[in-house]
Every structure is written in structure tokens, then in C-alpha cells.
Amino acid sequence: MNLLELCVKKLGVCFIEKCYEPLHLKHYDIGESWGRIYQRSVELCTCLGGEVICKRARYTVCLRNHCENDGVCRIIEATGEEVCGCKSGYIGKYCNINPQEQCYRDSGAQYRGLANATVSGSPCLPWNSDLLFNELTVDTVDSATLRGLGEHAFCRNPDQDKLPWCYTTSDRAISWEYCNIQPCSKQPFTRRDPVIAATPRPSRTPARTPVCGKRHKKRISRARILGGTSALPGAHPWMAALYIRDEFCAGTLVSSCWIVSAAHCFLSNPLQSQIRVVLGQHGFNDTGPNTRTFDVEKYILYPLYTQFQPTLNDIALVKLKKVNGSCAQKTPFIRPICLPGKDTTFPDHYCCKISGWGHMSEKANSYSQLIEGVVKIIPFDHCSSPEVYGSEVRSGMLCAGSDSCVDACQGDSGGPLACECDGVSFLYGIISWGDGCGRSGKPGVYTLVPKYADWINSVIKRSKKKTTANRTKINICIGNQCQR
């Protein structure tokens, strides 16, 4: 009796049974056929009535052996399927699973054991899951089988991380975690394994790689907040949630202790004790295991900001109060964005990203999970024309919008307009104001951050002379096109 049958018996439930193939560690549907090499015999098996029926099959030798760990390869003549015969200690369709492997060596790139749970106890998703349509999977990674990936949910390290990990689900969103598996004792490792080049990733031309503006390599957001799509947890690790009394705004982490936000979020002059900042948040007002919550030491509005003209100079700095001697520490879900220099320019029609927890429509009154959208920078002359915003758009502002009704909305205020160049994201704008949400011909208006770069850095430097905001020099980035 296989594992699935035992579960059915214990739970007392009734559904269509499947057949379990222990050599592949896989269940097959009724009527489904597959090949295998069992006790040196090449067999063609079929799932019939919940039972596995296998018969010897005629075969030929494979022209190219795809089987790993010295496995032999045969082709079943009737179906053309390549099957592997594994040497002792290995199983799996390609002999790439070692059930006896209980720990990992080095970074775990060659780990082939059966661990399938994360450090928090969450079950791993299969590497061929339909939910992972845009992540590291069997279909998207070069030499997937050589990296240990397959139609299974076992922990692996296919991207040269520091230890085995897997995708999982958290609050109905796709996330990932390191696995609950221990490193082996440091003993000589004699097994010869194939050397696999790392999956290519974008590189910057400067020798010194910036520490800001980089997502964790597994937190690539889906290429596609009103009209936007749900963001992957950690896809915008610089996002900050600001709970101000009974109000809500967003902000952007630019260094360990500093958040950039919109000045109009603080029009009510709240006390520092009435402000709470959450980093690493995915769902609105959700402080899960990936989040860190901070009190506020102080907030500073731009000196020329006035409540009588709340759209002008709409920028503020928020300093986090240290916890155990430090502020935000970098994790896959919490990382600072890069600040642009005062001369940084992204050209008209350049595609940037906005993100936030704001209302999903103009008349909505509830918040959401983190949503992202792609918008284009709109020429200043067009945005300041009489048919758009006229003289309301001033120096120090920029407009951005989309042909597909992507726009910021209530609750997104203070959040980032992040523009990327060579794989590094820069805080180019701050969500400030607009005429409604997603109205035709009325794009969002943003505070132009480069104009205030010197002020931001001077405030941060004054606060702690040895600490500066994360800056990477860039004057202009070209060649960007929106992804659909």
C-alpha cells in the first residue's frame, strides 16, 4: 500500500486513486503510462484501477545519455521515451535524487536529498508548479536537471545561494524560504559532480557593485495600484508602510535608518509616538515573519513645504528609532533603494515602476496586498499643457502614466516611482497627487527626487556624519522599453 492509499484510508475520503512510482517519487493518473528500468529490465508501466501494471519493453540505447550519477539510458521503442537505470543509492527520472542524503555540503548546490520543508515549517512547492510561471523552475533554468530540479518539491540550490531553499506559499502569495536542513560536518567530499556555470544575471559596468537598489536575485517581480498586478513578496524590498494615527501612507527605505515619503502625509502634525513604520510588509497591516516594525525618532519636512500649497516640495524624511542599537538590517525582503544624484535624468517615455497598498479603485475604501504597475515618464510640456494640469505642474514635479490605466490611488502617497538602469533601481519620484485615480488623460504627478537629492543627503549626513545615504552615480539611462 503506497503513501497516497494510506492517506485515503486514514482520512476516510473518496477520490480517484493514483498510482505511485517509487523509482520516480511520483504519482501517475489512471490510464497514464511511463517507462522505467527496474532490476535491470526495461519496463513500460500503466496505472490501471489504482494498480501499477508493468511489462517488459523492447528498447534501444540512447544516442546521448541524459542520466546522472553514472546512470544508464535506454529508449523504449514503443513510445520513444528515454528512461534511466540508476546505480545503487540514486533514484528519480534522471537518477538525480539521493534518499540517503541527510545534510548538505558547502552551499548545497549538489544536495539531492528529500528535504521538502522550510525553516518555518511550510511545505515546498514542486519545481514544475504552474504557480511558478515566472520563477526559477524546470522550464526557466538552464541545465535544470543538472541543478537538481525536476517534477518534485525537494529543497535545492539552483542559483548559487548560500544554502538549499524552495518556493512556498505565504498568505496566498508566492514566496520562498531557506530549508530546514542541516549542513554536514566538514569532511572531504569525494563524489565527482558536474561543474555547472551559474545562471547569467545582469551586470553593471562599474567595478564597484552598488549595495542599494538591488532586489534579492529570487525576488524578480512579475513583468506586467490601480490596474496593476500583485507583486511578489520582496520584489520591492525598499517599500515602507507608514501608519500615522488612523491614516496610512507609503515610503521608501534609502538607508538603514531613513525613509523618504511625501510631506502631505504629515499635514496633521502627528507626534512621533503616533507613527509606526513596517518594513518587509506584503499584505496591508500584516506583520508576518518577514517584516520589521519600527518607532519613529523624528520626521523632517522640506523647509519650503507649506500646508497652503501641499503639492509643492512634497517630500519628507522619516528617521527610524533604533532597536538594539541598529535600524533596518538587510534581508531578502528589506533592502534600500538607490538615491539619484541631482543631475540624474531618466528620459521621457522611460518605463518605471510604482508600487503600493492603496485603494484598487477611486471609490474603494479598503487596502490591498502590495500591487505594482509599469508607467511611462510623460514629457513635462505635455503634462503642464492646459488640457492636462496646466500651471499646477511646477518645477520639481514629474508626470508618469500608462495607456492601460495603471495609476496610483489613495493610500499610495509617499511611495516610490522606481526607475531601473542596468539592474539597479533608483528612487526617481515620490507618489504625490493627481486628478482622481486612473482617469483618462490625467496621469499621476510625482515629486522629482533628483531636485532634492542634496537636501536628503545633507539631512542624513547631519544626523550621523559617518553615515550617508546609498548613492550610485548615474546621469542618464537610455534604451529602456516597457514590458507587456
Image (cartoon, rainbow, N blue to C red):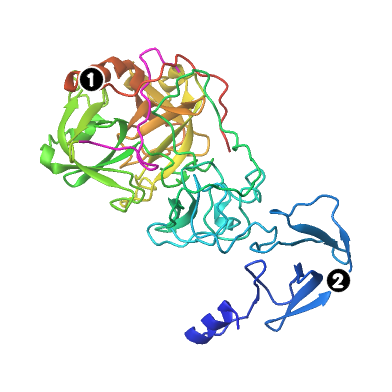
Residue 112, image quadrant: bottom right
Q: Nearer the viewer, residue 283 or 44?
A: 44
Closer to us: 73 or 121: 73
Question: How many discs appear?
Answer: 2
**Image position of 101 with respect to 234: above or below:** below
For mark 2, give the secondary structure. Answer: loop
Residue pictured at 74% horizontal, 57% vertical: 71
Please, is residue 291 above or below residue 211 in the view? below
Query: Label 2 sits on what residue type?
Result: Ala
Residue receiving disc 2 = 57
Is residue 343 on the magenta stretch?
yes
Three-letter amino acid code at the position of disc 1: Lys
Q: CA distance from mark 1 to mark 2?
A: 73 Å
Q: Position of residue 204 (x, y in %)?
A: 52, 23
Q: Around disc 1, counting alpha carbons within 10 Å, would you say few (fewer than 14), some (14 to 19), or many (20 or more)?
A: few
**The C terminus is located in which quarter?**
top right
* Res 276 → quadrant: top left
List x then y, in percent, for residue 167: 49, 53
Q: State which tag comes first along the sequence, 1 or 2.
A: 2
Q: Residue at x 36, y 51 (%)?
A: 368
Residue 308 point in image, percent of width and height: 18, 25
Label 1: which secondary element: loop
Q: Which residues are magenta?
A: 326-345
Image point (47%, 24%), residue name: 378
Horizontal side of 261 relative to 215 (left or right) equals left
Residue labelled with disc 1: 466
- Is residue 144 magenta-colored? no
